[in-house]
Image (cartoon, helix red, strand yellow):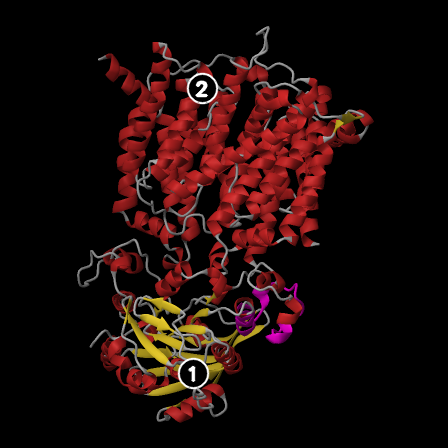
Amino acid sequence: MHAIDSLLLAIAASTPLLLAVEGEVIVQRSGIINLGIEGMMLAAAMAAALTHSFLGGIIGAAAMAAIFGVFAIILRADQIVAGTAINLLALGVTGSLYREMQDAFARPVARLAHDLVVPAAWIVAPIGLAALLWRTMFGLRLRACGENPEAVGRSVAMYRWVALAIETVLVGVAGAHLALVLSSGFAENMTAGRGFIALSIVIFGRWKIKGALLGTALFGIAAAAQYALQASGIGLPFHLLLAVPYVATLLILCGITGRVRAPEALGRA
Amino acid sequence: MKLEHVSKSFGATIAVDDVSLTVEAGEIVGLVGENGAGKTTLMRIIAGELEPNRGMVTLDGSVGFVHQHFLLVSEFTIAENLRLALGREVQFDRPQRLIRDLSVGEKAKVELMKAIAPKPRLLILDEPTSVLTPAETSELFQTIERLAHDGTSVLLISHKIAEVLAVATRTVVMRRGRIVADGKNMSADDLATAMVGVRGAPPTPAAPRKTPARSAALHFQNLTVSPGEIVAIIGVAGNGQTELATTLRDTLPRRTTAHIPEDRARDGIIAELSVADNLALGAKTSARTLIERFDIRTESPQQRAGSLSGGNQQKVLLARELDRRPEIIVAAEPTRGLDIEATQFVHAQMRASADDGGAIVLITSDLDEAFALADAIHVIYRGNLSDRLSPADAATNAGRLMAGLQ
Amino acid sequence: MRRLFIGAAAAVGAVAILALSGMAFGHPPGELLRILLVGSIGSPFALQATLIKTVPLLLTGLSVVIAFRAGVWNIGAEGQFIVGALASFLVARFGLMAALLASIVAGAIWASIASLLRFWRGAPEVLTTILLNFIGFHLLGYAVNGPLQEARGQYPQSEVVPPKAVLPAIDGIHAGLLVAVILAIAAWVMLYRTEEGLRLRATGFNPRAARWAGVNVNAQIARAMAISGAIAGLAGGIELLGVTHRLFERFAAGYGYSGIAVALLAQLHPLAAVLSAFFFGALTTGAGELQRSANISATIATFGQAVVILTVIAFGAFHARD
């Protein structure tokens, strides 16, 4: 019983991660690689903490996404560098705002008790997103944007913006959930690399929604093992345990048996 | 379809120069011309993909366009590709097959279906036979004739005069962006003359070379090349030529082998580097000397290699590779897209290298080139090489071997 | 010439945006600019602080220049910096030279983990280098809270390095500055005057064509990663032995990521990186002054870096569309 409880808890705790993975699968399927989800989630977390709302989180994510979209989709700039810049931007802005508005953050943020986000992220969203990708004309065209944009014609940019918008909502909710449910407000750097872990899980899951669920669940369990180990008093010192999630992610990236095939046009300007 | 005084430029380059053309229902018009004559650009204007700078395009119905480079998504099934292009379900043989598992000819059929399913009034085909076997080509021509009979007008771009004459009711010749000939009963000679502007010189016959009997420099599957020999590998594009060149590149010792890759712009020249830098990647001799020796037309050794013309880029590649006096040379489509002058230069270089003792593998889809240069010929089909043939044998059997028969 | 313009525009743009955003919090932009300028180069003390910050920025910048030039996404300078410093600390008892060498080797090894994973399992280095940053960061946390913690155990920091391993300094500016500038020149020579550099640039521009030209692309990439990591590791070692003299939790302070901004502003040119690093050094020092006198968070400098990067690639994007 106890084990199953902790398992479910671990999985629930990875909900922000799952949302990010789901969002990035959609975006990468459309041919864009968004390294900036880390920054988006961070901005979302801060905006949600400030406004004490999920909508605030989405708006925070949207601000970063809009800038990224301009550079990646309209200007066709290098997507990796643009994503990295977004992360630095979010880091700089949230860091500055956090110190600038110390008083605003000093107010204790009541933790939200009930939570629709977890079932939405683990059940509703996967079903909806998978259906969108694989059973609709829209999804077919979107996937074609990621494989051979020339075969789609003129509206490739539109599909990519829509994909980015979907990701924005998901990541906005993720950041808000992180700040308002899993923690009590904003803390500097609170996303702690979830964005990059999400990117790794997207690859592990072979750009599929099913893979997203599996990968995140596996990761959640591995990460939870860190706390279990700590609680049981086994060897590893606290700080090294903090490194476990990242080592686990490295292993996830290595655990790709056989060559994975990314969407053909991924990252191409 | 009617074009009136249509012109189109890309920056300083005039691609289409004051073209007027009328096509009636049921006509099959063959559009011929050398590479760079403006055929594809003109077709793209008719199809609505490009806007002309001047002139008017009048269409009486929709246009179907079969592109030279397929716009198919390899990872999708046939059904998905058709649904993507047409927005609805269409009948096709075994539509659950993935595009990447199809042969080139089958992919061409899918691409054709995309164009004709909406029942266009005008169908444009851009170099459709460049990747088809003779049998598939005649199947295509039957389809074209059927469509024309039902009232569709067909515009067929090709640089293969014989084929165009076989199916077209009327031929139009383009050169340097203008229409230079337009008629119904032109002969092959008429067309050839109009295409290049002068009577084409007959291909220079290979001068008999005295090669002392020496052991083979290159031995690969059933391909054997001795020093001083030129062996040509011919076949319809897409039958494993690229894979063969790549395998040879990865297995032969770099120090003594030279490679001229098939796609000179993408795989040969590094556009962002200077001419001198490109040369230095393979050659030891100074850039200035090489530029002079190979007659590379460039403003300076520091000029960006990407801004050179195709012919000069090929010269840079040759200089880079041949300076080492390699024992083996693997050249893939070395004269693709080059004008007569550049082509003759490349051929002369290859002969000189052979005379110098080099063993040359020439992968080409240009049969004239193969017969002009080669001492022996293999035909490649679906990745497999035929037995070694003398040029005479090849001349008789090439067609069948290229189609996979015999 | 065009590239000079882009660089200047990006730098000016960033400062302008910074000044303007200060307005949002009630600070007149002119005032902000004055503080930035004076705080960074307006006094010998400020200049010294700027030059000291220039050193790690220049080195991590060079690290990124080499990697990006080879077409490798080394976003791991931060972790390589930390690991370099850790190795330096451990070897410090054997003297300065040994310690610096250790930092070079450690940085190269840390970066090569990512290379290995790329070649062995196809793991994209853009992600593995970032993950290694996090791992390195926690490794440092473990070290200064545990085995390497100072004897009296009060703060999460290490002991001071022995005097024999301290970088000599003149007027408060340590020899690391000289090392960094020499390295910048060496990098330039390597990239533009040697065959290795030519192959590296070829690999970065067009790996397919480079392969056809006979370059062993995989080996080239591995070497570039190792060199890149080595320089970033050296940056950490020098920062330890020349400036902080002890390890502590926030040792890296984002120098690894800043290196990306330095490299891009310099448009991947090693000599321009010197100017670029100085610019960002000044920005960081000036931002510190902003915090002291105007109570504006110093993280505004990170914001400035992001703006610079975005400006530079915006121009690059227009260029690509020509």
How dense is the environment of label 2, judged by Cα within 10 Å: few (below 14), some, or many (20 and up)?
some
**Numbered badge on residue C201:** none
Using the image as rendered, state which of residue B75 and residue B346 is in the foreground: B346
- Would residue A85 appear left or right of A227 to someone viewing this image? right
Image coords of residue A170 (percent x, y): 38, 33
The quadrant where residue A119 appears: top left
Q: Which residue is mark 2?
A: A240
The quadrant where residue A168 appears: top left
Q: Amino acid at mark 2?
A: Leu
At 64% from the left and 30% from the top, the residue drawn is: C301
Residue B269 versus residue C192 in the image, above or below: below
Using the image as rendered, state which of residue B368 and residue C195 is in the foreground: C195
Which subunit holds the residue at mark 1?
Answer: B
The quadrant where residue B192 appears: bottom left
- Would residue B265 appear left or right of B171 to someone viewing this image? right
Q: In the rendered view of the protein, which quadrant contains the N terminus of chain A?
A: top left
At 62% from the left and 41% from the top, the residue drawn is: C263
Asked if residue B304 lies in the magenta stretch, the reply is yes
Q: Which residue is mark 1?
A: B21
Provide the secondary structure element on which disc 1 rests.
strand
The region drawn magenta spans: B291-319
Q: Does residue B81 appear anywhere in the picture?
A: yes
- Would residue C89 appear left or right of A17 to someone viewing this image? right
Which subunit holds the residue at mark 2?
Answer: A
Callouts 2 and 1 on one subunit: no
Q: Does residue B124 appear anywhere in the picture?
A: no
